[in-house]
Amino acid sequence: MSLDTPSSTMIRQVQKAIAFARKAHNGQLRRTGEPYLTHCIHTGKIVAVLVPSTGKRAIDTVVAGILHDVVDDTGESLDTIEREFDADVANLVAGVSRLSFINQLLRRHRRLNVNQAALSHDEANNLRVMLLGMVDDPRVVLIKLADRLHNMRTIYALPPAKAQAVAQETLAIWCSLASRLGLWALKAELEDLCFAVLQPQIFLRMRADLASMWSHPNRTGNARKIYGKFSSLLHQRMKRVTAEREEPSETDEENICMKVLLQAVLPFDLLQDRKKRTDFFNKLVANSNLETTPKVVRDAAFALGTLVVCEEALERELFISTSYVPGMEVTLSGRLKSLFSIYSKIKRKEIGINKVYDARALRVIVGDKNGALHSQAVQSCYNLLNIVHRLWTPIDGEFDDYIVNPKPSGYQYKVPTTHLWKFK
């Protein structure tokens, strides 16, 4: 659901909430110089992506997302919110306010105690347990995560020391809470935003290394099948832009602007929505101002573009294939691994970035009609696997078949029908 969804009830409530927030926050500015209302609206938009597309609870959650700071930062009361909207919205706003209050108290305590400037593992875990214990509705955490995500997207407005403290706290507390709610894509964006703030040089270098690794379509014999007209054009333009315009500020890792680095973190909803990815890619190729875009941002866009190309290449092969059972549902999706996750894997396994084979991944899901076509679905998976191997050469030691070799836990039948292929 988005704030532009043409649902009359939702539109009325959202417009009412925006008008209420505009009046309450009138004259207030963020550190970015923008009206405070922009934060309210962006928080509501993030919440809208995360909740179901219909239903009163979903609408109330979006409305509460817009109003989440009204009680803390203005003269309005919970009673007024309950009167203007309803008790559910007021309870959500109250829950977010409690979380914010406790979080601020603990942050102030750490700031006053130099020895506790950073959270230890046990302290972070205790704080997560305490925060969750204060919440009786998971939507409260969802709104607080949306609030934190937008604050992290604009954290460049804070002094560097404070930005780093907030990023450390976010990484230790809120990313973990996001995973507990199953908000993996949001968690990945939060992690990368924190990574950009805390390790800017490594972030910049990894983004450039991936772009370099993926910008050579002639490395494999199947390149012509994978890289079509649009990807070739993008590759040529990226190569030309890099050769013609390499500013000192883009190559000087010490002086890279935090705001630019944050722009190189792709929004989670863009990574979740394949149509958005494709539209983004097509606009990128047609962008006449590509030369003015900072290199690290171009590198991020190029990574997304190569994923779109791979998705389209496989989709074309699946579309013309007759190797699966007619009428059986086959869906395709892709994802980019977050830079923070790649960095963590490199450290954990002590490998180079060129050995991280799942930095991009495609997933093909074959429906088996709730088990009615199970054997046919399994056969279809193997047939579709042949299509995949025509496009990409399997990596030695990286292919797992859980049909033939189930995991010790018994994990067998889900993976063949939801198989993840790794490719370079």
Image (spheres, rainbow, N blue to C red):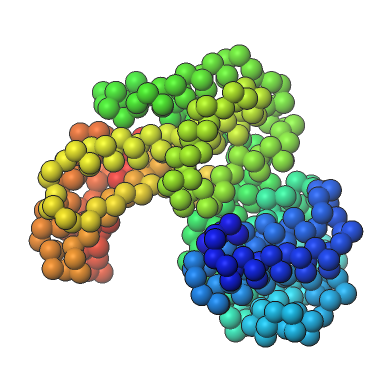
Q: How many numbered marks have been drawn onto this rendered protein structure? A: 0
Horizontal arrangement in the rendering, residue 86 relative to residue 402 (left or right): right
Residue drawn at x 74%, y 55% is: 38
Horizontal arrangement in the rendering, residue 284 relative to residue 159 (left or right): left
Examine the rendered structure and indicate whether residue 86 appears above or below residue 382.
below
x and y percentages locating residue 325 in the rendered image: 12, 53
Can you name the residue that lies furthest to the top here?
Answer: 244
Q: Residue 23: tell me if it is visible.
A: yes
Of the pair 44 and 268, the residue shown nearer to us:
44
Horizontal arrangement in the rendering, residue 219 relative to residue 242 (left or right): left
Residue drawn at x 51%, y 75% is: 55
* Image quadrant containing the C terminus: top left
x and y percentages locating residue 360 in the rendered image: 40, 42
Of the pair 100 and 328, the residue shown nearer to us:
328
Examine the rendered structure and indicate whether residue 97 appears above or below residue 66.
below
x and y percentages locating residue 331 in the rendered image: 29, 52
